[in-house]
Amino acid sequence: MVASTYETRLFINNEYVTAKSSETLSLTNPFDGSGVDAPVQVAGEEDVDIAVAAAEAAFKSGPWSTYTGAQRAKCMLKFADLLEANLQELAGLDTLTMGAPMGMGHFVIPGAAQTFRYYAGWADKIEGESFAADDGTYKIIRHEPLGVCAGIAAWNAPILYVGWKVAPALAAGNTFIFKSSEKSPLSALVLGKLVIEAGFPPGVIQFLSGGGKTGALLASHMKISKISFTGSTITGKKVQKLALDSNMKSCTLELGGKSPALVFDDANIPNAVGSTADGFLINSGQVCVAGSRLLVQEAIAPAFIEAVKERFAAISATLGTDPSGGASMQGPMADEAQFNRVMSYIDLGKKFSAPVIGGNRKGDKGFFIEPTLFINPDLKGKVFSEEIFGPVLSIVTFKTEEEAIEMANDTATGLSATVYTSDITRALRVSAKIDSGNVSINAPHLPSVQAPFGGFKESGNGKELGKYGLQSYLKTKTVLINMKL
Ligand code: NDP
């Protein structure tokens, strides 16, 4: 048998190992529908147990358990440099498996490196507290690592999620098991060799591949203390339930959204058009914070709609080229299932009214879909109320600020929102009333490593990034000392 060009094994205890399970994943290049010769090995129950045992040993008694914060930081900083040095290979693998344009890689990989550097800075700054023995008891409050933590990731930016989940966990002193998505497993597998090169001791980070079954094994494992999950709301609920029904492990859930973008008539129009049209179409709408419900104030709506249509037409004209070349930010749908899912929403929308642009497959190979714009769709219908995760935007008009806020909040999710206005007082007033974990003024929402990121309502719970992300990998212990003896 000819060996695959790609790394397809699991990475456990600083070694690439053959999975005990005999299952493999089959991958397709969504640019042209051709098969990718990479039978990625699936982690079954025994493999997950082996990975957990390695991570547990590293946490309890391996060299990592004695590392100072500064030693942990040294490995993390080296790892950040290695991520950037390997950008082309990592980004290229995400392009191959799920069609992410190389331009995305130039954003995602440095973003992950920046997250490792940010949390390396925290590794030797985890403080405790104390209270005087004024009542005869001296009180110490300590923040301690949780133990073995695991991450389960969505397919659209695997290396970014490695940064968001693994970096804070390691800064806090935990060990980690990361499961990528079955749609995009190749890039994370390459990271094993970077883990060794960065000097992490065995067992500190493992990379497993596999589908939902592997994820469920992690979520329900009795020796895993925390799951950080990025994915859909429907799967997030399952993960939360598995965690609860096993050992009540803590869960951070970064789930989907149907984010509103509110454009008021005093907005800087060229900026608002660029942010809501081009910004929405980054990665062809396969971004969790994409502003897929565009609410535009009535007076400016006709001109605004025309301007968005023009941007969609311009982007559509360049769509369909190989995402592995150039700096394009738009590619195909990640795979056939995602393509069919998005097309089914477009077909539903067409039953109410035809899109003013787009609505079809682009080209005759691969999984490209034309940027598609619906104006005033059925407000109770699925196109306007459910996450599509593709290049399908709806524009609805509003008269007053109150009406815009009501429409923005009329959704089960609350991941992010954007507000376009030149009136800063209005911007602050509206941002206070929007029921979303993240609000951006006059720009698409791009998470910042310094600030917490996470949704409200069915967009999940808990926060990643910033000091809040670090705290979610620590448990707080109280020690009381009787000073009267
Ligand atoms: P899914 O929910 O389908 O999958 C997410 C991860 O969960 C995958 O690794 C998947 O494995 C795994 N999984 C599937 N079933 C189970 C299970 N029963 N138990 C444990 N794990 C399971 O999401 P997608 O990958 O399709 O990603 C798109 C979704 O992610 C969108 O809803 C999007 O909004 C959301 N998202 C949220 C972000 C945020 O930060 N809030 C960021 C990016 C995306 P596999 O795929 O291998 O089957």
Image (tube, rainbow, N blue to C red):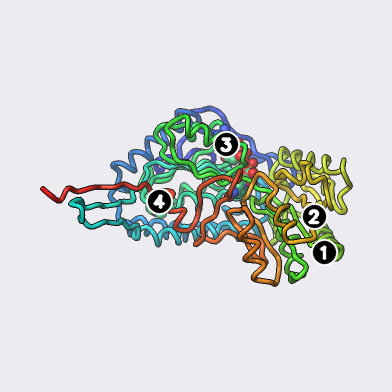
Can you tell which mark lies on residue 237?
Answer: 3
The residue at the point 52 percent across, 36 percent down is 240
Looking at the rendered structure, the kind of residue marked 2 is: Ile
Could you tell me which secondary element the residue under label 4 belongs to? helix
Q: Earlier in the sequence, mark 3 or mark 2?
A: 3
Looking at the rendered structure, the kind of residue marked 4 is: Leu
Can you tell which mark lies on residue 170?
Answer: 4
The Cα atoms of the two marked residues, 3 and 4, are separated by 26 Å
Q: Earlier in the sequence, mark 3 or mark 4?
A: 4
The residue at the point 60 percent across, 45 percent down is 457
Residue 126 percent across, percent down from the top left: 34, 57
Could you tell me which secondary element the residue under label 1 belongs to? helix
The residue indicated by pointer 2 is: 395
Q: Earlier in the sequence, mark 4 or mark 2?
A: 4
The Cα atoms of the two marked residues, 4 and 2, are separated by 43 Å
Judge by depth and name the residue closer to the eye, 391 or 87: 391
Q: Residues within 10 Å of mark 4 (few under 14, many from 20)?
A: many
Can you tell which mark lies on residue 29?
Answer: none
Can you tell which mark lies on residue 304?
Answer: 1
Judge by depth and name the residue closer to the eye, 417 or 5: 417
Residue 150 percent across, percent down from the top left: 46, 41
